[in-house]
Amino acid sequence: MSAFADNPCTRCGACCASFRVDFSRHELLSEGGTVPDGLTVEVTDSTCRMRGTDHARPRCAALQGQVGERAGCGIYEWRPSPCRDFGMRSPLGIGDDACARARARHGLPPLNA
């Protein structure tokens, strides 16, 4: 198993089903970025949001699978900057406070800090 596949952060999905994801519309594919337009909603003239992340029970439209078991981002290579910036220690399998809150929301224990 590769280190990427063995990393709990790349298969958890709790953050993708816990937080609103807003970003600059310059990140949209139609604007020269990488984020597929169809997975977003316009918030303002300059801001977009990942579809589904503003619901009472958030779940990003790009999230695939079941949170905490086998989940992943369907657009991982093209995800917006807030998703890229979230959990900067995630490549090491180490969570932070936001990660712990997201995991708790889904009944999951925090990652080792």
Image (tube, grey):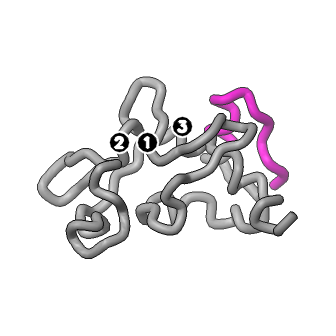
Res 99 seen here: yes
Q: Which residue is tagged 1?
A: 61
Q: Amino acid at mark 1?
A: Ala
**In this view, which residue lies farthest toward the bottom?**
32
Label of residue 17 in the image? 3
Task: Write down the quadrant of residue 68 in the picture.
Answer: top right
Q: How far apart, in angstroms, are the residues tagged by discs 2 and 3?
A: 11 Å
Res 85 seen here: no
Residue located 43% across and 65% down the image: 81
Q: Amino acid at mark 3?
A: Ala
17 vs 91: above or below: above
Q: Amino acid at mark 2?
A: Arg
**In this view, which residue lies farthest toward the top?**
56
Task: Write down the quadrant of residue 37 in the picture.
Answer: bottom left
Q: Position of residue 78 (x, y in %)?
A: 45, 66
Residue 38 is left or right of residue 72, and the answer is left
Cβ atoms under marks 2 and 1 closer than 8 Å:
yes
The residue tagged with tag 3: helix, strand or loop?
Answer: helix
Instruction: Pick whichever of labels 2 and 1 is earlier in the sequence.
Output: 2
Instruction: Pick whichever of labels 3 and 1 is earlier in the sequence.
Output: 3
Q: Which residue is tagged 2?
A: 51
**Boundaries of the magenta span:** 100-113
Say if the magenta span includes residue 101. yes
**In this view, which residue lies farthest toward the left?**
45
Residue located 72% across and 67% down the image: 91
37 vs 63: above or below: below
94 vs 58: above or below: below
Say if the magenta span includes residue 58. no
Q: How far apart, in angstroms, are the residues tagged by discs 3 and 1?
A: 9 Å
Where the C terminus falls, by quadrant?
Answer: bottom right
Instruction: Pick whichever of labels 2 and 3 is earlier in the sequence.
Output: 3
Q: How far apart, in angstroms, are the residues tagged by discs 2 and 1?
A: 5 Å
